[in-house]
Amino acid sequence: MQRLLTGLQSSGALHIGNYFGVLKPFSEMYDRYESYLMVADYHAVTSLRDPEALRQNILNVVKDYVAVGVDSSKCVIFQQSQVQEHTELAWVLECLVSVPFLELSHAYKDKVAKGLEANAGLFNYPMLMASDILLYDTDVVPVGEDQRQHLEYAREAASKFNNAYGQTFKEPKELISKEIAIIPGTDGKKMSKSYGNTIPLFGTKDEIAKAVMSVVTNSSDGKPEILHAIHGNFRPIAELEAPYTKGNNFKELKEMLVEDVEALVAPMREKRNAITDEDVKAVLKTGSDTAREYASKKMADVKNKIGVSL
């Protein structure tokens, strides 16, 4: 069985883009692999400076995965910061790649363009992500088409280490579902917490309605294309043909989308509300212990090969 690794930053409330882009695909495939699901809390530190919010987000992201149907007994759910080998290996990999190489990162340039501080953690982000993947001899990583570069960085880091010190790391492959599109946000850009254009995944119906009602509806041909693109994730496109061409009453279309979002979210929201913080801590303790056992053996091999083990 191949090993799969994925994860989400614990940097804020999830939205429907996260659901269709990451959670739903993972929930449908994870039991076909030896799956590792990482809460990427150290990655969140590049932009989140609120300790209490980060603690709560760590708990919340695990609740989110369990609520959408992930069985914690069938995968390793762990906390990145509880496995110190992630940051250890990241340093080693940073010593093998160049500054110009890291400067090519689309994610770094995009976040700086959005106004985020160009801190060193954000700049070195690709090597911490590479260590996340390489530590576990990962075979595949599910990513969106726009995240393909992350795997290129991981493969390059693995190749540089292997060339310098001998075969040590697998070069992982991206697992991209062609059916998953980039979900537009309420303003037409990619749905993202940093853009503030999201529809909350586990929000109340009123919160969902408020977000949906803010979706821009301007269009050159009379069809609200952004609204239509979001709606197509909730029901077959063929079912949208009539309502989206029948007079284009934008308020009615948005109300229909609210009902469709609520129909999907309500059962998951109920399940999520029943999960306690203590339930999550127990899951993370078990998963982090398992991940640490594997990562420590891998890091011991790395230390021996680079010459720091005496």
Image (tube, rainbow, N blue to C red):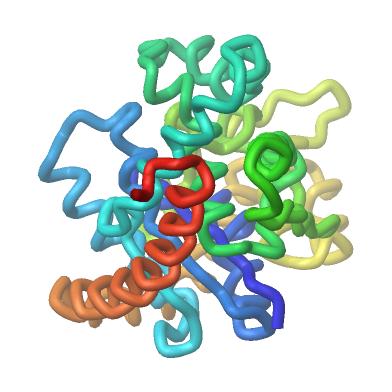
Give whichever of 255, 267 is nearer the camera.
267
Q: Answer above or below: position of 151 versus 206.
A: above
Residue 250 picture quarter = top right
Left or right placement of residue 129 versus residue 119 in this view: right
Quadrant where the image shows the N terminus: bottom right
Give whichever of 251, 75 is nearer the camera.
75
Q: Answer above or below: position of 234 versus 210.
A: below
- Residue at 58%, 18% (x, y): give it: 110
Number of numbered labels in the structure image = 0
- Residue at 28%, 71% (x, y): give it: 284
Left or right placement of residue 1 versus residue 197 in this view: right
Q: Position of residue 132 (x, y in %)?
A: 49, 51
Q: Position of residue 190 (x, y in %)?
A: 62, 33
Residue 238 picture quarter = bottom right
Give whichever of 232, 114 is nearer the camera.
114
Q: Position of residue 100 (x, y in %)?
A: 64, 10
Whether residue 227 is visible = no
- Residue at 65%, 50% (x, y): give it: 253
Q: Answer above or below: position of 187 versus 293.
A: above
- Residue at 73%, 39% (x, y): give it: 163
Whether residue 156 is visible = yes
Give whichever of 96, 203 is nearer the camera.
96
User: Going by the picture, which residue comes out furthest to the front?
Assistant: 310
Q: Position of residue 289 (x, y in %)?
A: 29, 74
Left or right placement of residue 201 versus residue 152 in this view: left
